[in-house]
Amino acid sequence: MGCQLRWGTKLQILSSVSIINLAFALSLICFLIMHASLLSSNTTTIEVNEKKKAVRWKYDLGWKKNFEQVFGTKKVFWFFPLFSKEDLEKITALHGLDFPTRSDVEA
């Protein structure tokens, strides 16, 4: 016959798996919130320390422009690591050499 587990053992396994699952889900939620915050302010994890020193972050163009710099303007490509030809021509930051800055903040 097969190996059968007692009710107490099943409950222990289920509760252990549930706790691990909850911890993993909470860590992913925190990770998602942190990256949404970084995206909305147009910063990287390294630039967070530099940003604390500045009164206004020079690369923060507003949440919509920040989002377009990262994901592009075409919604079709948002879930794929692709950019449209129009985005490559229009958004200079995608080339990685020149990044737009706010006009009201000095460099």
Image (spheres, rainbow, N blue to C red):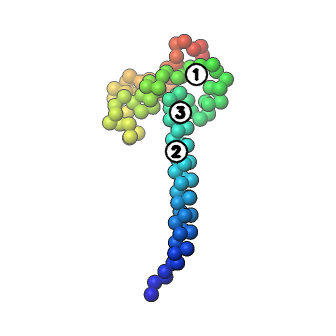
Locate the C terminus and report the quarter of the image it occupies: top right
Whether residue 32 is situated above or below residue 47 in the rendered picture:
below
Give the secondary structure at mark 1: loop
Give the secondary structure at mark 3: helix
Q: Position of residue 91 (x, y in %)?
A: 41, 24
Which amino acid does the dot numbered 1 rest on?
A: Trp
Residue where numbered disc 2 is placed: 29
Residue where numbered disc 3 is placed: 37
Q: Report the front residue among 46 and 2.
A: 2
Residue at x 63% of width, y 19% of height: 55
In terms of image quadrants, where is residue 85? top left
Q: Position of residue 72 (x, y in %)?
A: 39, 30
Judge whether residue 18 can be spotted in this image.
yes
Which amino acid does the dot numbered 2 rest on?
A: Ile
Q: Position of residue 89 (x, y in %)?
A: 37, 24
Judge whether residue 93 can be spotted in this image.
no
User: Do the numbered discs 3 and 1 sit on residues whose CB atoms are within 8 Å?
Assistant: no
| Mark number, residue 57 | 1
Q: CA distance from mark 3 to mark 2?
A: 12 Å
| Mark number, residue 3 | none
Residue at x 52% of width, y 72% of height: 10
In terms of image quadrants, where is residue 68? top left
Foreground disc of the pair 2, 1: 2
Q: CA distance from mark 3 to mark 1?
A: 14 Å
Q: Report the front residue among 37 and 84.
A: 37
Q: Residue furthest right?
A: 53
Which amino acid does the dot numbered 3 rest on?
A: Ser
